Image (cartoon, helix red, strand yellow):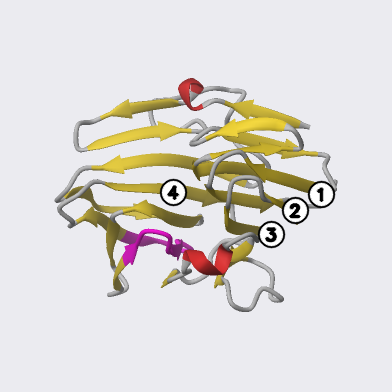
Amino acid sequence: MIELRPFESLGGANHGWLDAKHHFSFASYHDPARTHWGALRVWNDDTIQPHTGFPPHPHRDMEIVTYVRSGAITHEDSLGNKGRTEAGDVQVMSAGTGIRHSEYNREDEETRIFQIWIIPTSQGDAPQWGAKPFPKGERSGQFVVLASGHEQDGDALPIRADARVVGATIRAGETVEYALGSDRKAYLVPATGAVTVDGQRVNARDGAAISDLETLSVTAIEDSEIVLVDIA
């Protein structure tokens, strides 16, 4: 089953410095049919204006993955971590027992991110943060695991969830497959371009909620960059 969620149907709010679109219920946007997808709780599509950002604020017991689509985001937290994550790269924050962090666009251009929240499989663990570059060339024509709660995905950033966050860049006309398993769910969003998923078109920034599919077949209509979350 594939449920298409067109970009135009997403909730959201424009705060001036932040233009946020929500694939799932978040903040003042509530849709009882879009509260989560398996353990996936939040997928926000954020555009942050230059030299603005999120001031320090707390989180706990949530796995928060930030995929930078353009520009860069600068992170600081109460553990003393600091880092700048550029387009195509990923950062992960396991909030655990509690952490305060800020996320600022300190660039002279807009920054665009996907921020993805996944419900952890355990609570009360120590908070942690990490970031890693994933050059897009490594994802050419294939899926690469960016963050994972599975030990066999050793090169991926660790998360405390039964989930994987994967990315791929696909040239127009190319097809890639992802072995999901019919007992799992996936949520796929093209950051750029347009693809078909088992024959159904998904445009840039649309969401596709996927279930009951053993293997996903994704074909690029245009050169595309896609992000997918595989969850229980």
**Residue under label 4:** 115
Q: Is residue 4 magenta?
A: no
Asked if the residues shown at circle 3 and circle 4 are in contact, with their CB atoms under 8 angstroms apart, the answer is no
Mark 3 neighbour class, 10 Å CA radius: few under 14, some 14 to 19, many 20 or more: some
Q: Would residue 159 be seen by someone viewing this image from the given angle?
A: no
User: Looking at numbered disc 3 in the image, what kind of residue is underneath it?
Assistant: Asp
User: What is the x, y in percent for residue 117?
Assistant: 51, 49
Numbered badge on residue 215: 1
User: What is the x, y in percent for residue 9?
Assistant: 50, 21
Q: Is residue 92 magenta?
A: yes
Q: Quadrant of the N terminus?
A: top right
Asked if the residues shown at circle 2 and circle 1 are in contact, with their CB atoms under 8 angstroms apart, the answer is yes
Distance from the alpha carbon under mark 4 to that under mark 1 = 25 Å
Numbered badge on residue 162: 3
In front: label 3 or label 2:
2
Numbered badge on residue 103: none
- Sequence-wise first label, 3 or 2: 3
Mark 1 neighbour class, 10 Å CA radius: few under 14, some 14 to 19, many 20 or more: few
Residue drawn at (74%, 54%) of the image: 178
User: Looking at numbered disc 4 in the image, what kind of residue is underneath it?
Assistant: Gln
Mark 2 neighbour class, 10 Å CA radius: few under 14, some 14 to 19, many 20 or more: some
Residue at disc 3, secondary structure: loop
User: Looking at numbered disc 2 in the image, what kind of residue is underneath it?
Assistant: Glu
- Sequence-wise first label, 2 or 1: 2
Distance from the alpha carbon under mark 2 to that under mark 4 = 24 Å
**Residue under label 2:** 177
Distance from the alpha carbon under mark 2 to that under mark 1 = 7 Å
Judge left or right: residue 188 versus residue 179: left
Asked if the residues shown at circle 2 and circle 4 are in contact, with their CB atoms under 8 angstroms apart, the answer is no
In front: label 3 or label 4:
4
> Magenta part of the protein: which range?
85-100
User: Looking at numbered disc 1 in the image, what kind of residue is underneath it?
Assistant: Thr
